[in-house]
Amino acid sequence: MSLPLESLRAASDKHPKPAHLHFQYGTAGFRTLGSTLDSVTFKVGVIAALRSKKLDGKTIGVMVTASHNPEPDNGVKLVDPRGEMLEASWEGYATTLANTSSTEEFLDALDQFVKTLRIDLSKPSRVVYGRDTRPSGPALVAALEDGLSAIGAEIRDAGVTTTPILHYLVRASNYKGTKDSYGEDSSEGYYEKLSSAFKKLVAGKSALPPLIVDCANGVGAQAVAEFSKILGDKLKLIPVNDDLSTPGALNNACGADFVKTSQKIPPSLTSVLKPGQRACSLDGDADRLIYYYLDERGQFHLLDGDKIAALVAAFIVELVKNAGLEHEIRVGIVQTAYANGGSTKYLSQRLPVKCVATGVKHLHHAAEHYDIGVYFEANGHGTVLFSSDTLKTLAEHQPSTPAQSTALGHLTNLTQLINQTVGDALSDLLLVEVVLAHKSYSGFEWDSLYVDLPNRLVKVAAPRHLFKTEDAERRLVSPPGLQAKIDELVRRYEAGRSFVRPSGTEDVVRVYAEAMVRAQADELAFRVAGLVYDETGGDPSQRPA
Ligand code: G16
């Protein structure tokens, strides 16, 4: 069987690549201005179908989202059959195909691609897709559908949904009716699975005070509303920034990225958030979660991905021990260079900790090497993975005391509560609430697990293709000589640490710095940002505020 060239040609002609633009499958797929992504999204439809054929008709996911980016941006990424990010080797193929400049070039590259990978075109192809709330979403989904129908894929439209639900649907549909079943194959199945695990885990615990949830004016508002309906008094959620109709509102002065980067509450919460009250922020597609609270003096305290990892890992380690499984199950942590030095010190005194490059795909794979792998990026993106051996151990273990039996039950329910396909803000929120309820912690006690080093994250408008890193992105190899200058600067600050890396989702270079005191962390970040400017000839008038 060969490629349906006529239908592909006709469809491709409708989606010409904009001249002079180069597209790159980055940290989380293709991501740039939504208005430029028509041809890319069309081609992703074709690639998704071919990926499905290559994997013997397994369902592949496609999510149209730009997550934390500003509203005019959009993006598209592929999801593999277990609900994980696309296998790395295909990222390069996707980039090559996305940059073919004419229909004939695309068809030739496609033909070559099918031959090189020995894709059996007679296999079926199944693709499920969804999008977030961005205005550019519907047109991009139409382009995606053109690609899917040109190649004859069997399609399922999940509509406007969160990224983690799309990942869930991919896994649930591929493992339906098997011993690895992941839950009912629908968004209702997702809500039901997580809610029922949550209810079991908090049974007998006093209900926590209501939680304010900043939905970033994005699709997470939908999920918060659904969970509120199902959970009722078990967990009272107060949604804010749940406006899905005002143009420009998405991620604007709200959401997880705003809170983490600016280290303050969204202005819209000023009159809502009372001292001591817990609040959290999702991002635009609800795969990141950041908690925070104000103390009695009104001072802001951030409970970011590092703090979530510490809270959750300690709880799991305790349950494993209480279940009598500490010799069978090894818990480990995965972080990135952005992890606060305070968290790395605290965690590595207790557990194995590994540092990998930014991007859930890197953390996820590293976490798979542990029996229970807890991975969180400082920006609030993360989850917990239970290996198949661990699931078997949990299923077969015979507890010898009632306390062991209770701990075992909690661990088993956690495997249902946690969305193991990818970071999931709502699943993580429920997980955090379970731990807080079990430990009777307020934000204050949670925050006291360890002290964060003051830190600053800065975006620099510099040509990011010039920046190459090594050592899990902690050191620059290019531009040559810049790392030595950064090292020289860092030495002058007590507990100083700084690194520079190109973003894979925005057209910027990111600079991170931490030091013993706030003013020094800020100063170090801005001085390193200055070095980046001087090195690349950036326009100083565009220095970040
Ligand atoms: C995506 C990735 C995350 C990553 C973030 C920022 O998040 O899934 O793993 O931390 O981008 O990446 P970068 O610093 O390379 O721009 P999201 O929530 O935007 O999909």
Image (cartoon, helix red, strand yellow):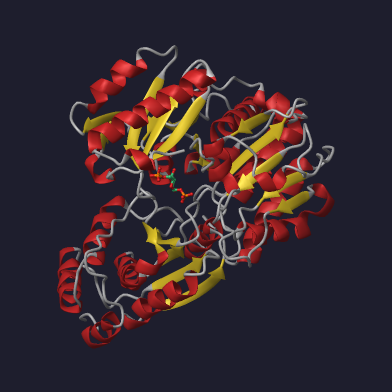
**Location of the N terminus (image quadrant):** bottom left
Q: Camera-side residue: 407 or 23?
A: 23
Report the label total: 0
Report if residue 103 is visible in the image.
yes
Residue sitting at x 55%, y 71%: 159
Residue sitting at x 35%, y 67%: 36
Report if residue 401 is visible in the image.
no
Q: Position of residue 462 (x, y in %)?
A: 30, 42
Q: Quadrant of residue 450?
A: top right
Residue sitting at x 36%, y 31%: 529
Q: Camera-side residue: 463 or 52?
A: 463
Where 428 sits versus 113, above or below? Answer: above
Residue at the outermost front position: 541
Q: Camera-side residue: 166 or 52?
A: 166
Q: Position of residue 62 (x, y in %)?
A: 43, 65
Q: Position of residue 260 (x, y in %)?
A: 55, 38
Where 423 sits versus 250, above or below? Answer: above
Residue sitting at x 37%, y 12%: 492
Q: In the drawing, does residue 101 fall left or right of residue 286?
A: left
Q: Quadrant of residue 493?
A: top left
Where 75 sits versus 490, above or below? Answer: below
Q: In the drawing, does residue 58 fall left or right of residue 181?
A: left
Q: In the drawing, does residue 340 fall left or right of residue 473?
A: right
Q: Position of residue 246 (x, y in %)?
A: 62, 65
